[in-house]
Image: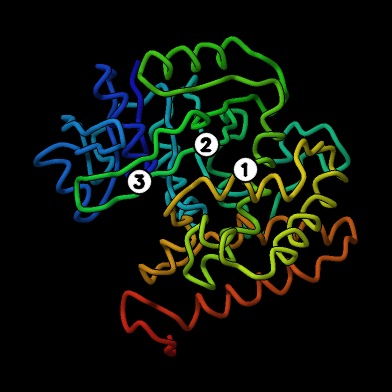
Amino acid sequence: MKLCIFGAGAIGSEFGGHLSAAGADVVMIGRGAHAQAMQSAGLRMVSAEGERQVPVRVRQDTASLPAQDIIIVCLKAYAIAAAAPQIAALCHADTHIVFALNGMPWWYFYRHGGRFDGQRLRSLDPQGVIWDAIDPARVIGTAVYQATTITAPGEIHYLDLAYNTMYLGEPDRTLSPRLMALETVLREGGIRVQALPDIRAKIWDKLWGNIAFNPVTALTHATMDAVVQNYDDTDLMEAIMNEARMVGEKIGITFQLRPAERLEAAAKLIGHKTSMLQDMEAGKATEIEAIVGAVREIGKWLEVEMPHLNGLYSLVRLKERFYSVGVTNAIRPS
């Protein structure tokens, strides 16, 4: 079975490293110094349990690649539209695609079955480019719980915590044969994975924490544990999560935890920088639309008041436009 990791960033590299170490037929698509380092020397994978150097197959383009059986897309949410034609070109009739994204996925309401069944999220796919290029029937949903960072070209550090899991599920909530087959392939490839009947619940479980922690850490440059331990006003964090909770509940999501419990869990991620903070520090665009913008869009459909979410969204967008730590370490015009 041919597997492609489309986007060899931190999470994509970890998946590709585990699969390669297990002997899977996997190729990673990546760019820049990290991809070049992996091409020449393999991937150095470091965790609290130790480190290993894994030979990996990396390409910086998809030219001449054969069609793939499984494609795991690990791009930033805002990069998918530009890559959609390349992803589609790697598909044969039965190719399945997993979008391992932060935040709300573009396909969320495909076979949702609720009030907004089939609705497209314009905040994630403004021109409909992704939906038109990639048949959502190919999609197997996922929610990835991993804490991984590229620490140098060709090197990743990851937290190998007990709850780190790649959850999988069908948009129509069935435990289909293709879903169970994918679970087996990934488990045999060294990835902790679990198939679920309702992947949207897990998507919201992750999103619920990200929607508070990602913007706040991007604005303050604090790690997740530092936000909980040193931030004087966790009431703000709880207010953000409660606004998101109102939106989720109105489209059928049941939340199992209280905001305070989610804050306690985040405090255990010692020194971890959220993806949005990492992007901000690198002077890159953030995934604010997937993490906050999509929830705001759905909230507007439902006429839910979201003053805290709206404020955070505006502040991150403003900082994203005028701030680049990687260039000047100061506010600057774009």
Which residue corresponds to mark 3? 10
Is residue 184 depicted above or below 137 in this figure? above
Q: Disc 1 on helix, strand or loop?
A: helix
Quadrant (top left, top right, bottom left, bottom right) of the C terminus: bottom left
Does residue 166 appear to the left or right of 312 in the view shown? left
Measured as percent of width and height from the top left, residue 324 is found at 39, 78
Say whether disc 2 or disc 1 marks the residue closer to the N-terminus: 2
Q: Disc 3 on helix, strand or loop?
A: helix
Which residue corresponds to mark 2? 144
Measured as percent of width and height from the top left, residue 39 is found at 14, 41
Task: Give the camera-side residue of 256 and 201.
Answer: 256
Amino acid carrying label 1: it is Lys
Q: Residues within 10 Å of mark 2 (few under 14, many from 20)?
A: some
Say whether disc 1 or disc 3 marks the residue closer to the N-terminus: 3
Does residue 46 appear to the left or right of 70 in the view shown? left
Disc 2, disc 1: CB below 8 Å? yes
Rendered residue at 74%/50% (across/down)? 259
- As measured in the structure, the alpha-carbon distance from the residue carrying label 1 to the one carrying label 3 is 18 Å
Rendered residue at 47%/46% (across/down)? 84
